[in-house]
Image (tube, rainbow, N blue to C red):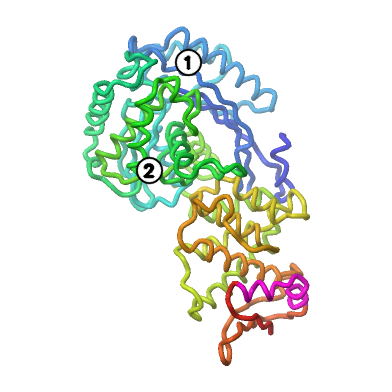
């Protein structure tokens, strides 16, 4: 068992288990190891990646080329060796293939060679299965209720219509980035910008493919997208919009970029020779030659579907397969609450004292609600949920060290993907946890991500979290309820609680947080 898998082992009666999901995509191949426990937690604990380009050259013959097959077998030999070294075999290894292998005229011969050399039985997903698992990944890593899920790879793109979190209709089109590059953009001079007529032909072809599903045109609403090209384009837009400030990379999980931003990226990419597209911050060098085709395809989807933006998820096909076949079930592969599951999953991984953190969250929300009811401030949309998440995760940094654990918590929260939360929200949660002990809260390096009023929200939520920690200082849940209210002339906020406040008074006085409280709420704090 890998050292990465042992952290939460002590919290369950059974040892964590591992599975490997091998995704044989048209462009890249990945081996991802997932570790999970009986109590519902899971995490990705290892990954191998290779740009195999198994679909390269298929536009000419329809068959996998000898060169591509050679690259594929060599990569699978590495994957098989890795699995043996990690004692992953049999039912622990799941190998799936998608568009390029599915459509290849020599598919059977290739799969036979894979079986002979590695022993792997490759499951070739149908178009609808590929769309389904992309949907499972997106619906369990976003708050999407009604809208469309898009999954674009090297060989194909899938669109799934979603109503009440359930998949209704799906379209699979052979318009992946590798295919579109070879068919429409490969004849141009790689040392020169892309030709306008080639890009127009590509767009027209994608629009023709989209016409196969009438529901796509004018669909509008939310569009949640997955795939390496989507993540690269989102990273490029994020870097262009907010720059690189160093420190902790907040990532693109939940990032939303507008149709206009994609148009700008398309213009930028098209104006550059292929080699220079790789130099754009956020675009991985291995995708430089195919990223324009992916961007043009996405641009066409936005235009035809009248979507205003793209929301990105880091999860993909392999995550959907893992969730549907391991954590959830194929009949109803839906997490009841994506945000709550993400927060609890992270808390369990880092050995949080859940009884303590849940009580801190309970007290924090009680105080927050009492202040809102008293009319002391108008909460921002989703504020209470962000406070709850910060309270649940404020102690995760103790897995590193008690000293400065508030700072460690900030790093761990910001570095986690926290599905269901956008980058701005993750930054706010991380900063609330960062200031749950001391200091004047501020967004700092993530200030550019903030919206008007976010600094004030951070200030009051961090203060309430800090006060809730004082109330639960004994970690015994002896304070069963609390409220803050204005009494008499309204000049002070009175904290009234059920339980012994001796330790709370000492803790507040010891750390001088009565002064911090007055700074935030412009009223002194009276305890008891």
**Residue 366 among those drawn in magenta:** no
Taking depth in this image into account, of 464 and 93 the one nearest to the observer is 464
Q: In percent of the image, x 32 and y 31: which residue is there?
A: 297
Q: Position of residue 406 (x, y in %)?
A: 69, 56
Taking depth in this image into account, of 18 and 380 the one nearest to the observer is 380
- Dot label at residue 310: 2
Q: In percent of the image, x 50 and y 81: which residue is there?
A: 374
Asked whether the beta carbons under mark 1 and mark 2 sit within 8 Å of each other, the answer is no
Q: In percent of the image, x 54 and y 56: which residue is there?
A: 340
Q: What is the secondary structure assignment of the residue under circle 1?
A: helix
- The magenta span reads 503-519
In terms of sequence position, does the residue under pointer 1 or pointer 2 come before the other? 1
Q: What is the secondary structure assignment of the residue under circle 2?
A: strand
Q: Position of residue 252 (x, y in %)?
A: 49, 42
Could you tell whether 131 is left or right of 339 in the image?
left
- Dot label at residue 111: 1
Q: Is residue 291 above or below residue 387?
A: above
Tell me if residue 511 can be seen.
yes
């Amino acid at each position: 068992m890998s050292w990465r898998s042992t952290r939460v082992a002590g919290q369950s009666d059974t040892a964590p288990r591992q599975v490997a999901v091998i995704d044989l995509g048209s462009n890249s191949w990945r081996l991802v190891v997932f570790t999970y426990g009986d109590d519902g937690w899971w995490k990705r604990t290892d990954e191998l990646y290779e740009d195999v380009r198994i679909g390269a050259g298929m536009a000419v013959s329809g068959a996998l080329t000898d060169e591509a097959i050679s690259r594929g077998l060599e990569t699978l030999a590495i994957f098989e060796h890795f699995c043996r070294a990690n004692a992953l075999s049999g039912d622990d290894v799941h190998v799936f293939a998608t568009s390029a292998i599915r459509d290849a005229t020599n598919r059977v011969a290739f799969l036979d060679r894979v079986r002979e050399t590695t022993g792997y039985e490759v499951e070739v997903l149908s178009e609808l299965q590929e769309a389904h698992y992309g949907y499972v990944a997106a619906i369990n890593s976003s708050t999407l209720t009604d809208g469309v899920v898009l999954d674009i790879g090297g060989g194909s793109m899938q669109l799934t219509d979603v109503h009440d979190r359930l998949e209704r209709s799906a379209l699979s089109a052979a318009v992946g980035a590798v295919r579109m590059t070879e068919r429409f953009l490969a004849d141009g001079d790689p040392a020169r910008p892309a030709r306008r007529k080639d890009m127009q032909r590509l767009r027209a072809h994608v629009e023709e493919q989209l016409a196969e599903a009438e529901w796509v045109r004018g669909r509008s609403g939310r569009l949640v997208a997955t795939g390496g090209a989507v993540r690269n384009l989102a990273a490029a837009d994020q870097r262009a919009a907010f720059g690189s400030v160093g420190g902790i990379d907040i990532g693109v999980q939940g990032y939303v970029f507008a149709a206009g931003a994609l148009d700008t990226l398309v213009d930028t990419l098209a104006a550059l020779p292929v080699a220079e597209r790789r130099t754009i911050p956020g675009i991985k060098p291995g995708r430089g030659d195919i990223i324009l085709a992916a961007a043009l395809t996405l641009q066409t989807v936005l235009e035809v579907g009248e979507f205003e933006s793209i929301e990105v998820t880091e999860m993909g096909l392999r995550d959907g397969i893992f969730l549907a076949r391991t954590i959830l079930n194929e009949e109803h592969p839906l997490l009841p609450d994506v945000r709550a599951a993400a927060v609890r999953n992270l808390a369990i991984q880092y050995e949080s004292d859940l009884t303590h953190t849940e009580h801190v969250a309970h007290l924090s929300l009680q105080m927050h609600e009492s202040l809102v009811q008293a009319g002391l401030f108008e909460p921002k949309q989703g504020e209470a949920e962000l406070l709850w998440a910060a309270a649940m995760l404020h102690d995760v940094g103790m897995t590193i060290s008690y000293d400065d654990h508030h700072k460690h918590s900030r790093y761990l929260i910001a570095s986690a993907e926290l599905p269901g939360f956008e980058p701005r929200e993750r930054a706010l949660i991380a900063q609330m946890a960062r200031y749950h002990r001391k200091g004047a809260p501020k967004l700092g390096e993530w200030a550019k991500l903030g919206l008007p009023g976010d600094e004030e929200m951070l200030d009051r939520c961090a203060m309430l979290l800090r006060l809730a920690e004082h109330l639960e200082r004994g970690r015994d849940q002896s304070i069963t309820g609390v409220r803050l209210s204005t009494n008499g002339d309204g000049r002070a906020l009175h904290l009234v609680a059920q339980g012994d406040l001796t330790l709370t008074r000492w803790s507040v006085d010891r750390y001088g947080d009565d002064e911090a409280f007055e700074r935030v709420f412009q009223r002194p704090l009276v305890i008891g």
